[in-house]
């Protein structure tokens, strides 16, 4: 996927800050059975190259009582935030959530596809207003 950035650096930063400001009271557990997401389990570092430069996020996917628990975030954005809408679509694990930036809500979709020892990452805001691709590598223990 090609990045189609129509956003200023400030708008993207505000949006990503909005991701970090999602309500922390949400349960991080989805309805997806953990057995369907074994290839994605663990702690990952997502690295993306955007038209505005590199961007990294942390990703955690775990088995929580037999269901997938996921969270994303970055230290500079306020830490990890839960994602409860986790589904499978063919080979992809799809994380979907809403972010609030400058008073507007935006749907965000992060699709992950196993590719050897890494995950290919497809990050999209809205219906293509902004998209980026990258990879996720296992985080150092």
Image (spheres, rainbow, N blue to C red):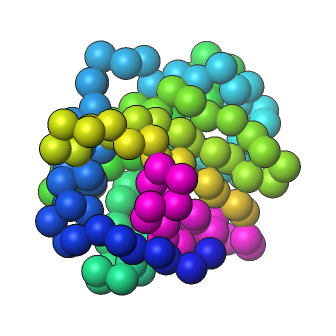
Q: Quadrant of residue 6?
A: bottom left
Q: Residue at x 51, y 27 (%)?
A: 84
**Residue bounds of the magenta highlight:** 115-141
Q: Residue at x 58, y 23 (%)?
A: 30
Q: State the count of labels.
A: 0
Foreground residue among 41 and 129: 129
Q: Is residue 109 left or right of residue 49?
A: right
Q: For this view, does 89 lie left or right of residue 56?
A: right
Residue 36, compared with residue 112, is above or below; it is above
Q: Nearer the viewer, residue 99 or 74?
A: 99
- Most foreground residue, 141 or 106: 106
Is residue 64 rendered to the left or right of residue 89?
left
The N terminus appears in which quarter of the rendering?
bottom right
Q: How far across and how far down the image is residue 116, in percent?
A: 74, 72
Q: Is residue 31 visible?
A: yes
Observer able to see residue 46:
no
Whether the magenta-drawn stretch holds residue 127 is answered as yes
Closer to the camera, 48 or 124? 124
Q: Main secondary structure of the magenta part?
A: strand
Task: For the C terminus, give its image quadrant.
Answer: bottom left
Residue occupying image coordinates x 69% and y 35%: 87
Residue 138 place in picture, x, y as percent: 52, 63
118 in magenta: yes
The residue lying at 21 percent from left, 61 percent from top is 11
Estimate the x, y position of residue 108 in percent, counting from the top left.
46, 46
């Amino acid at each position: 996927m090609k990045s189609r950035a129509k956003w200023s650096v400030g708008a993207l930063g505000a949006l990503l800050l909005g991701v970090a400001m999602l309500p922390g009271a949400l349960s991080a557990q989805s309805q997806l059975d953990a057995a369907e997401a074994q290839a994605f389990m663990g702690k990952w570092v997502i690295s993306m190259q955007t038209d505005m430069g590199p961007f990294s996020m942390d990703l955690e996917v775990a088995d929580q009582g037999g269901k997938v628990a996921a969270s994303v975030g970055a230290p500079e954005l306020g830490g990890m935030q839960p994602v409860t809408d986790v589904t499978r679509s063919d080979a992809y694990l799809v994380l979907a959530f809403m972010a609030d930036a400058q008073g507007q809500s935006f749907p965000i979709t992060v699709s992950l596809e196993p590719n050897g020892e890494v995950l290919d990452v497809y990050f999209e805001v809205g219906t293509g207003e902004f998209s980026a691709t990258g990879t996720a590598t296992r985080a150092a223990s």
